[in-house]
Amino acid sequence: MIVRKLNLHNYRNYSSKQFEFKPGINVILGENAVGKTNIVEAIYYLSLPRSFRGVDDIDLIKYGEDYASISSKVEIGKINRDINIVISKQGRQITINNKPIERISDLAKTINVILFEPKDVLLFKGSPKERRNFLDISLTKQTESYLSAITRYNKVLKERNEVLKQDKVDKTLLETTTEMLIKTAAPIVKYREGYLKDINDILNKITRALTGTHEKIEIIYHPFVANDENYETNARNAFNKALETDLKHKATSVGIHREDFSINLFDKDIATFGSQGQNRLVALALKLSPYFLIEDKDKKPIVVLDDVMSELDEKHQQVLIKFLKKFEQVFITTTKLVIAGASHYEIKK
C-alpha cells in the first residue's frame, strides 16, 4: 500500500500544495510550525476521516476559505485508487474513483495508516480511553465485523444512557437495553482478547529489534468481567451491582466501554516501574505491531511517525531507521534528520 500523490487545497496552512511520494522512507523536513504535521495529518485522514489532533473538521479549512480538499492516488498492489475528500461547513464528501462512499468503513478498507505521535509516549500512563482507542481503531482496520459490532454497542449504550436520564426511569426498558448491551458486548470481548493475544506473540520481537535487549513484555487484558462460559451471567451480575450507581449518576458505569489493558515489563506494570525511555520504545513497538498482523503485502499499512526522532537519542534513531526499512512506506516528520537512501521533502514557510 503506497500513497503516490497527495494534493492539498485550502487545507490548514496550504492554499495549494502537491506531493509525489515514493515507497520506503519519506522524510518531511522543516522548521517548527511550517506545516509538516499538517501533511501527515492529511494522510491519516485518508484512512480514518478525522484529525488525530482532536480538532473538528471545520478547523482543517484554511482561514477565510469555504472548503478544504484532500486528494490522493493510492497504489494497492497493481490497483490504483483515487481518493478525494472535500470538507466544508456543511459536512464532507468522500469519493473513491469518483464514486461516493456509502460507509466510512469503505474508506477504512481502502487505505490503512498506522500513526505514532508525540503524545503516544504516555500511552501506558494516560487514560484507559487512549488505549481503548488504539485497540478499537486497530481492530476496525483488521476486520469490518468489529466495526459493525462496536457501532451497535455504542448505539445501545447511548439508548441505555438516555433511559437513565429520564426523570422517572422505565425499569422494564432499562432491563431490555441492559440485556441488549450484554449480548452486543460478548463478541467484542472475544475480538479484543484474540487480537491482544496475537500482538503478544510479536511484541517482544519488535521491542528487541528496537532496543537490542531481551526484555520480557506481556500485554494484560482487563475485561470488565471474566470472559468464560458464564460471561453473560457475569455481565448481568456486574450491571445489577452497578444499578444504584448508574441511577444516581444517570450513566452506564460498567461495560466494555470502560475496559483497559496494561503492559508488564519483567512481570511489573511498565507504567509504574518502567523508565521514560522504556515506556516510549514499547509504546512505539505496540503502535507498529498491527503492521505485522496483516499477511497480504499489498495491504500492509502506511506508517506515519510524527516528530518521533526528537524523542530518541542518536543510537536509537539509527536502530529505528534500520527497522523502518522493512516497511512498504513510512512518513517521518523531523526538523533536521537526514536519512541515507530516503526521499526528502523540505517544507518552508
Image (cartoon, rainbow, N blue to C red):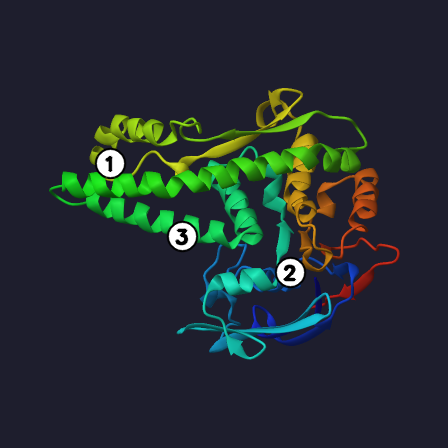
- Residue 251 visible in the picture: no
- Residue 308 visible in the picture: yes
Q: Is residue 136 above or below residue 55?
A: above
What is the x, y in percent for residue 69? 55, 74
- Mark pair 3, 1: CA separation: 24 Å
Q: Considering only order in the chain, which callout, 1 or 2, is on the residue closer to the N terminus?
A: 2
Residue appearing at x 52%, y 78% in the figure: 99
What residue did someone put label 3 on? 151
Q: Quadrant of residue 304?
A: bottom right
User: In the image, what residue type sits under mark 3?
Assistant: Thr
Q: Give the label on residue 40, or none.
A: 2
Residue appearing at x 73%, y 26% in the figure: 215
Q: Give the label on residue 321, or none.
A: none
- Judging depth in this view, the residue of 273 and 96 nearest the camera is 96
Farthest residue toward the left?
A: 168
- Mark pair 3, 2: CA separation: 27 Å
What is the x, y in percent for residue 81? 64, 72
What is the x, y in percent for residue 241? 27, 25
Residue appearing at x 55%, y 37% in the figure: 194
Q: Give the label on residue 249, or none.
A: 1
Label 1 residue SS: helix
Cβ–Cβ below 8 Å for labels 3 and 1?
no
Q: Quadrant of residue 237?
A: top left
- Judging depth in this view, the residue of 190 and 174 nearest the camera is 190
Horizontally, residue 39 falls left or right of residue 316, namely left
Horizontally, residue 321 falls left or right of residue 66, namely right
Mark 3 Cα shell of 10 Å, populated few (<14), some (14-19), many (≥20): few
